[in-house]
Image: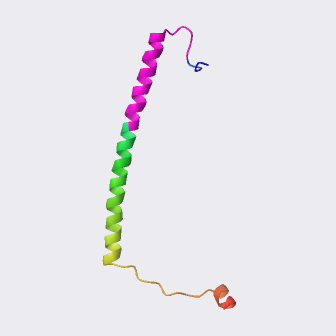
Amino acid sequence: MMPADVTEQQSPEELLQQFRDRYNTLQGETQKLQQKIRDNESTALKLLGAIETLEYLHPPAEEPKTETPAETATE
């Protein structure tokens, strides 16, 4: 079964060139996306390190626990 966009007027050479062009385009897009993922992962790790450092140096103040009426009713 042939794809719907393939017509009988196209020669095997034309089809081959179209398929090669589409393949090369997809390969290029994939490489760009893989690089973007690597860049994002690197940035995320740096941000995580900065977050952990700031939380270590300046721990968030613990909020006093307040009991809700539902908690006091069950005790």
Q: Nearer the viewer, residue 60 or 38?
A: 38
Residue 21 in the image, given as x and y percentages of width and height: 41, 22
Let me know if residue 8 is in the magenta part.
yes
Relative to 15, is 27 above or below? below
Relative to 67, is 25 above or below? above
Residue at screen point 31% across, 71% down: 53
Q: Quadrant of the image for the N terminus?
A: top right
The image quadrant of residue 42 is bottom left
Q: Quadrant of the image for the C terminus?
A: bottom right
Residue 13 in the image, given as x and y percentages of width and height: 44, 11
- Magenta segment, which residues? 6-30
The image quadrant of residue 23 is top left
Relative to 48, is 42 above or below? above
Q: Nearer the viewer, residue 2 or 43?
A: 2
Q: Nearer the viewer, residue 59 or 34?
A: 34
Q: Farthest residue toward the front? A: 1
The image quadrant of residue 56 is bottom left
The scheme the figure's colours follow is rainbow
Report the side of 22 relative to 65 (left or right): left
How many marks on residues?
0
Q: Farthest residue toward the right? A: 73
Residue at screen point 36% across, 64% down: 48
Relative to 4, is 75 above or below? below
Let me know if residue 59 is in the magenta part.
no
Helix, strand or loop: magenta stretch: helix
Residue at screen point 37% across, 37% down: 31
